[in-house]
Image (cartoon, rainbow, N blue to C red):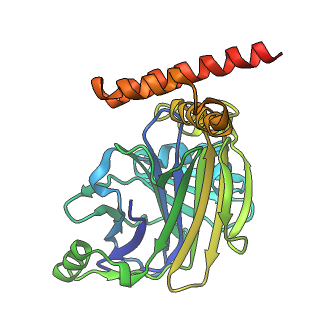
Amino acid sequence: MDNTYFILSNRSLSIERFQICTWKLIGKDAFVELGVEIKKENLPNEFDVFLAVPFAMNVVGKYSLHNQLAIADNCKLIFNDTMTNQHPIDGDSRKGSVIEFGSRAKLAIVAVDPIILNEYGLVKVHIKTPSENAASVYFRVLVELNVNNLAIVHTGINKKSFIYDFKVNETRNLPEDVYKYKEDHGLSICGIASVFLFHCVPDDYDISYIDSGKLRNVRRLETDSFNKYLKDIETIDKDKYMIVFLKLKGNENYSFFTTFVKEHIGNKQIIFAILANIFCSLLFAYETWKNWVVVKLLVNLASLYPMWACLIVVLIVIAICLVVKKRSES
């Protein structure tokens, strides 16, 4: 799956943070969280934000997470800062909340109802700027997908590779449909001050490549905390996942490349190993069995039966003969 992301708008916006969190839970389809923090200074009363995402055609569910972030524990989990105070926007919690933190500036977390423009690969979000005093306006959405994985998956004989190749605001990769919509509706690509990227994957994945300059930490997922945060949306099994956090700031565009590997042994691998073992045994035993009358007889009869059936019979007979001969020698 293509992993190119853009933020566009019909207004001149200053995007302070763009957060992407991918989730790969065992036995479930993928889902993604998208968070956007916009500097509140000089914002119009209303405006639209368009997220160009590669999975727009695969969205099957969508949620605004403003209610979750109005809870102190959830807020600390996402923003890594303690909530000191919060009140509903215009006295109505359905519109969102204004959050005060111990360290960072005040944040107005607004309720949104994302509209999926799947034919253009866009998620449209309409925002009403709250009148309350706050440094930034923030929204966060979760979208459920009907695809198993956001990574590019390569399957080998004994392992699978999961390639997460994420690009943000790389205009050379702007999809044609997004470009056409942008031109027809007078949109512009918004500059982004910093990008936060999180990958939540099973903990039996090994990291085979990651850009250490962008890596902030790798840790075991705090399952209990995230189950409270995603209550009534998703359920996460305990002690089965890790989360990888990457960050980059101050660029015109951003690129993140991470590869995970999972080793696996399935029926194909077992069959391959057995056949390889038999083949090697035959090679080592060639001088012993090449003059056996029974083998020659089977080869002569091969023309009477399908080749695959004869091959199976030959292998079985040779294996039995080798065992008998080995026992007789001992």
The furthest residue to the left: 184
Q: Is residue 188 left or right of residue 328?
A: left
Q: Please report the residue visible at 73 percent of the width from the left and 65 percent of the height from the top.
A: 216
Q: How many marks do you count on the picture?
A: 0
Q: Position of residue 232 (x, y in %)?
A: 47, 31
**Vertical side of 116 occupied by 50: above or below:** below
Percent from the top left, x then y, of residue 141? 43, 52
Residue 160: give x, y in percent of width and height: 55, 48
Depth order, front residue of 159/213: 159
Residue 58 vs residue 273, the one in the foreground: 273
Name the quadrant containing residue 264.
Answer: top right
Q: Which quarter of the rendering shows the C terminus?
A: top right
Q: Is residue 132 above or below residue 76?
A: below
Asked whether the viewer can see residue 312, the reply is no
Name the quadrant of the N terminus: bottom left
| Residue 251 percent across, percent down from the top left | 56, 85
Residue name at image x 61 percent, y 16 percent: 320
Residue 70 showing in the rendered view: yes
Looking at the image, residue 113 lies above or below residue 202: below
Q: Is residue 193 left or right of residue 183?
A: right
Residue that extends furthest to the right in the rendered view of this protein: 330
